[in-house]
Image (spheres, rainbow, N blue to C red):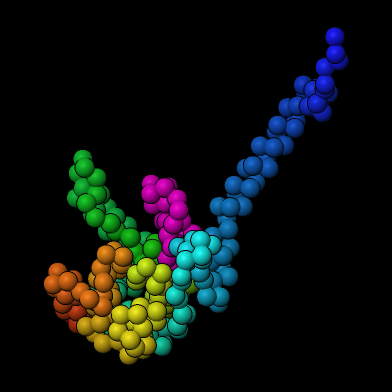
Amino acid sequence: MADAILTPDDMLTRPEKRRRRGGLWRKLVLALVLIGLAPFALTLVYVVVPPISLPMIGRAVTLRDVDRRWTPLDKIAPALPLAVLSSEDARFCMHNGVDFGAIELVLNQGGDRGPSRGASTVAMQVAKNLYLWYLPTMVRKVAEIPLALWIDLVWSKQRIIEVYLNIAEWGEGIYGAEAAAQAYFNKPASALTKREAALLAVALPNPIKRDAGEPTRRLRSLAGLIASRARASGEILDCVK
């Protein structure tokens, strides 16, 4: 009868096997902790370094076009951040990255069927785009809250809206205000009019289907509503001046 072939594991005693398994578990836990802490560390780096979002990275690694031209906030027409905040996060200057009042309102309105709309702030959307895009929805929503609070703590309000306007998706492979302004209006972001800014703002919830350059009647109507809201909310940009 042929001799059995012994593997290194077969030669270990039971306590040694337990120690080896324990070591593997510790390494796994350490790896998960480091992965969890990475976004918090990257947020510190992104105080000064222009960030790249996960959707941009995803397109780049699959060899699809990415059009993003980093543009400082002072080179973007003020009408755009005003329109975007009026549409996406009207209490931007009043909360610390998470609008808990809006979240509670949405949950209460949802009833047994769940919330009927979102309550994501700009900081939460930045967290999603930079770090959480490919996670399952429920996991992502939970993770957005601590990351948004951290982003609001570490970055200025100016930096938050600047990053958001430079990583937001405005069409297939179109990221950021400068690329969107050039693609849809053939002009730099600094020259956007209030109407154009409103059209870009209302395209954000579904930028693949909503074309700011060739808006439908409904999109024009929504843009008019946002433009009116922006005119009536002059103080919304106080914290980014």
Residue bounds of the magenta highlight = 126-152
**In the displayed structure, would residue 53 be above or below residue 72?**
above
Most foreground residue, 22 or 220: 220
Q: Is residue 204 magenta?
A: no
**In the displayed structure, would residue 88 be above or below residue 162?**
above
From the top left corner, tell me how far across and down residue 64 is, in percent: 47, 66
Q: What number of labels is visible?
A: 0
Q: Looking at the rendering, which quadrant does residue 49 occupy? A: bottom right
From the top left corner, tell me how far across and down residue 37 is, in percent: 57, 55
Q: Residue sitting at 55 percent across and 77 percent down?
A: 48
Q: Is residue 137 magenta?
A: yes
Q: Residue sitting at 31 percent across and 67 percent down?
A: 207
Most foreground residue, 210 or 139: 210
**In the displayed structure, would residue 66 be above or below residue 182?**
above
Residue 36 in sight: yes
Which secondary structure is most common in the magenta stretch?
A: helix
Q: Residue sitting at 28 percent across and 56 percent down?
A: 118
Q: Looking at the rendering, which quadrant does residue 145 occupy? A: bottom left
Tell me the quadrant of the picture where the C terminus can be found: bottom left
Tell me the quadrant of the picture where the N terminus can be found: top right
From the top left corner, tell me how far across and down residue 218 is, in percent: 14, 69
Residue 160 in sight: no
Q: Looking at the rendering, which quadrant does residue 2 occupy? A: top right
